[in-house]
Amino acid sequence: MAKRTDAPAQHPADSHDLIRVHGARVNNLKDVSVELPKRRLTVFTGISGSGKSSLVFGTIAAESQRLINETYSAFVQGFMPTLARPDVDVLDGLTTAIIVDQERMGADPRSTVGTATDANAMLRILFSRLGRPHIGSSQAFSFNVASISGAGAVTLEKAGHQVKERRSFSITGGMCPRCEGRGSVNDIDLTQLYDENKSLNEGAITIPGYSMEGWYGRIFRGCGYFDPDKPIRKFTKREFNDLLYREPTKIKVEGINLTYSGLVPQIQKSFLSKDIDALQPHIRAFVERIATFTTCPECDGTRLSELARSSRIKGRNIADLCSMQISDLAEWIRDLDEKSVAPLLEALRETLDSFVRIGLGYLSLERPAGTLSGGEAQRTKMIRHLGSSLTDVTYVFDEPTIGLHPHDIQRMNELLLQLRDKGNTVLVVEHKPEAIAIADHVVDLGPLAGSKGGEVVYEGTLEGLRASDTLTGRHLDDRARLKESVRTSSESLQVRGANTNNLRDVDVDIPLGVLVVVTGVAGSGKSSLIHGSVARRDGVVAIGQGAIRGSRRSNPATYTGLLDHIRKAFAKATGAKPALFSANSEGACPNCNGAGVIFTDLGMMAGVATPCEVCEGKRFDASVLEYKFGGRDISEVLAMPVAEAVAFFGDGETRTPAAHKILERLADVGLGYLTLGQPLTTLSGGERQRIKLATHMGEQGGVYVLDEPTTGLHLADVEQLLGLLDRLVDAGKSVIVIEHHQAVMAHADWIIDLGPGAGHDGGRIVFEGTPTELVAKRSTLTGEHLADYVDG
């Protein structure tokens, strides 16, 4: 895009109207160069893994944030995350970048929608001013502040003499003392923590990670509170109490200062204080086995003390307001006319109205932040920026239409245009044609994914993209057809009286052995129905949107369990130990400890990662690379793409059925281009979800529940996903998909539509039947949009 030359006497400051990127090589980008117009809306498209996030987030946004951090003093930078400069030749014309991504919000049980935005803080100030009776400052209404008081002697310097005086203090907080602001209390089944017939040295403790071989063994043997060789059932009352309930106590073991803590306080701190959905699967299974969570009987789940609940405005306390649907709360605040707090009321109204405008009016302020979907979390973060007075800022969005019904996408488009029209540059990574349609400028990456992507295949207008012969251009106007014949079911999974969140005693029979799509506007109750009443049943494999946990040492081979089979195959062929073929174990390069790179800490400056000179980034000790399997060493096998590895482990002397099965599943979900050793931290959102799907496909389960599997998928990838879902159903599985994508709806055998609206306007089933019947009736919002889609 050329610079403007329409005004002959242009001011020099007005000539910087482009963001120029030249020679970007982050991840799979191949010397990418683009020029993006400022104060316009640019959409980045391309197949999953083509390099969109690497260009937008890893290059443009990352460098902007790094440059801003460098404006702070060295002292302040020491407390900030250090960011390395992206691998790019020229980055020019950058403005301050504000990233609004899909990262789930903190899963701390005390974090709610209200605390994550400013709404709760403003409500607390409102009650401290207008609440009757008056009980204290705003912290008296906070469930994160405990009430404490104390008294004692203090020593003061007065006129050169030390004087002792008695002082007392008290802090009035709003935290419920019983549940400590969590809203729920838990009871622990002690029999699940240990085997009473064994001694500690015999492995009596059954808590994950509590092994007598490590530090816990040292602490239990050296604390002196009990005999580690005595069976637990023979413990005295005092020994039993020390094992289970002793508060943290400093002890010395073998000359080392350590802290001993009883099992119950330790579990409460390590496991029960965290959001259960954020725990690793085996820890979550353990917690679900040992603990029962019940609503706190003292605060009735409001998290607030009785004193905080006693103060009211117009007959309502702060807990009542936080439990209201935000759209209703906005109306209640609008009716509140109090001149003494007029600016506060105006700011609170604006925040609540932003929730409604952005399509989140169905939430309540007390909703735990960790339960929001990726799309809801992203839109909640947007609220901070909608009323901002900042201009000439670069806003960066990662698929803002995720989790949105076609009915809601138009509203999101208006918000993006609103940000642009205030004079901001808006960069959006997106797949949905409805969102691409509003772009002023389009950058299409490809031509394919992974090592076959990383190039700009088109840059220009939307009309030009349509005419181009790129993968996105060819699929932009795709319209799915309704299936001529649908599968029928003879069995069903019955749900009766479902009332999780906003569901209204829903009764539904979900057909088995077919492809079922559960749909409805955002907030209509889809996830509440499926995750609340179906996902936890026996034989059901639920694949949610949660992020994959893994360090930069984790890769597709380690995550899927493939590496175990590869190591065994190498060991069998060479006679060496399997541990030699792990870069995280005995086979690691001694210089870089198997990382492949050397990290140099430069204090408050960004650390530098340089390839290890000894192993040349291969991660393995040179002696390990002498062992060959099928003519390749372990580093060469891990450098293979999945598609190549399928053939390698499928035939001939290298045939390994267990490894081949996992690789076929990875290829099935469209990840044939990934290399086996690619770090998980470099995968895009769509790739992470599909690698989870491939892993779960190996589980023994009759019913698969998928939560928006088209998240992060290009239009061309959706076709492949539908083929995979068909293969699962044809193999005798039942597949239930929570989805908004019209192509998936059109492909369904049976549709369950919830609504008619969101929040208390939803929670009911408004349609059950085939896609053809839904289109013919056009009786719901989904029906109207699906009819327009298949007719268009």
Image: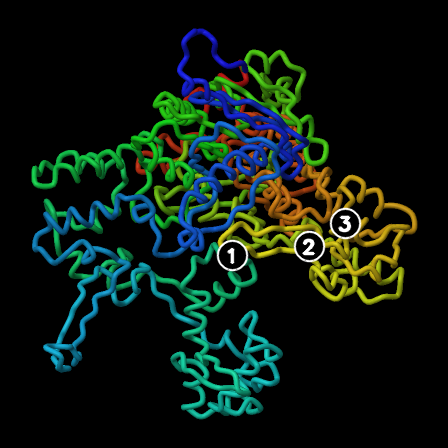
x, y (%) of residue 781?
41, 24
Of circles 3 and 2, the one toward us is 3
- Answer with left or right where residue 568 lies relative to residue 333: right
Amino acid type of the residue that numbered disc 3 sits on in the rendered structure: Leu
Where is residue 443? Give x, y as percent.
57, 23
Front residue (pair 92, 324)? 92
Dot placed on the residue nearer the N-terminal end, 3 or 1 = 1
Marked residue nearer the N-terminal end (3 or 2): 2
Disc 3 from disc 2: Cα separation = 11 Å
Q: Residue 523: where, in percent of width, then height?
A: 38, 37
Query: Which residue is drawn at the image coordinates 56% and 42% (left, top)?
Result: 85
Labels 1, 2: front one? 1
Q: Residue at (76%, 52%) from the top-left corner?
A: 616
Amino acid type, residue under disc 1 in the picture: Gly
- Number of residues whose C-alpha sits closer than 10 Å to that of mark 1, classed few (under 14), some (14–19) or many (20 or more): few
Element under label 3? helix
Q: Quadrant of the N terminus?
A: top right
Q: How many numbered discs sit on the rendered protein?
A: 3
* Label 2 crowd bin: few (<14), some (14–19), many (20+), radius 10 Å: some
Q: CA distance from mark 3 to mark 1?
A: 33 Å
What residue did someone put label 3 on? 638
Indicate the secondary structure of the residue bearing disc 1: loop
Q: Residue at x 58, y 33 (%)?
A: 55
Looking at marks 1 and 2 on the same chain, the residue that comes earlier in the sequence is marked by: 2
User: In the rendered image of this protein, does residue 223 appear above or below residue 280?
Assistant: below
How far apart marks 1 and 2 lie (CA) works out to: 32 Å
Against 779, residue 31 (above or below) is: below
Query: Judging from the image, what secondary structure is the residue with disc 2 in?
Result: helix
Q: Which residue, given by chain and number where applicable, does mark 1 sit on?
A: 603
